Amino acid sequence: MSTSPGSLVTAARGLVQPAPGTVHTLAPGLRARAAAVLLRMALDQALDAYWRRVTPSMTRIGKHRMLCLEWYAGQDTARRCRTTWSALSAACHYRTCELPPGPAEIRTRLLEVTGLLSALGVADG
């Protein structure tokens, strides 16, 4: 089963920006980490969709698709993708000696992923 990048972003938004009156059983840090996982999945899927349109063979080469993005999508988009993907990857990993990511940090990454979906030509809905 595959979920669209836009649906993943919507689910992440629901975790870090819950509707008024919503009661959550998870702590804010856990919701932020779960949202980070969803956002990184959305960014990965958006990159796959982008490369399927541009040159399908790039979807098989994990690290190279990020390195080559600069020549296809522009320096700014490539830099934003690398920075956002790295930050989300760090936020996804559980470390016993570190606090979970803050909801404010993940809300910032949410906005960045939303912008990257548009820059990569992937619908956000």
Image (spheres, rainbow, N blue to C red):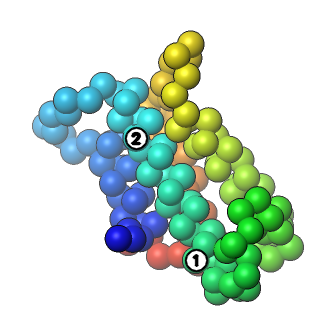
Q: Residue furthest right?
A: 71
The front one of 37 and 79 is 37
Please tell me whether residue 58 is drawn above or below residue 92 in the rendered image.
below
Relative placement, left or right, of 125 versus 96 is left
Query: What is the number of the mark on residue 57?
Result: none
Question: Which structural element holds mark 1?
Answer: helix
Query: What is the number of the mark on residue 49?
Result: 1
Residue 35's spot in the image, x, y percent? 42, 44
- Provide the residue designation for mark 2: 34
Q: Residue furthest top?
A: 97
Name the image quarter holding residue 62.
Answer: bottom right
User: Which quadrant of the figure contains the N terminus?
Assistant: bottom left
- The amino acid type of the residue labelled 2 equals Ala
The front one of 116 and 58 is 58
Relative placement, left or right, of 29 versus 27 is right
- The amino acid type of the residue labelled 1 equals Ala
Please tell me whether residue 16 is drawn above or below residue 57 in the rendered image.
above
Question: CA gap, disc 1 to disc 2?
Answer: 23 Å
Kindly identify the residue that appears in the image at 13 percent across and 37 percent down: 21
Mark 1, Cα crowd under 10 Å, few <14 / some 14-19 / many 20+, is: some
Relative placement, left or right, of 95 versus 62 is left
Question: Which structural element holds mark 2?
Answer: helix
Mark 2, Cα crowd under 10 Å, few <14 / some 14-19 / many 20+, is: some
Residue 59's spot in the image, x, y percent? 67, 74
The front one of 26 and 78 is 26
Q: Residue 106: in sight, yes or no?
A: yes
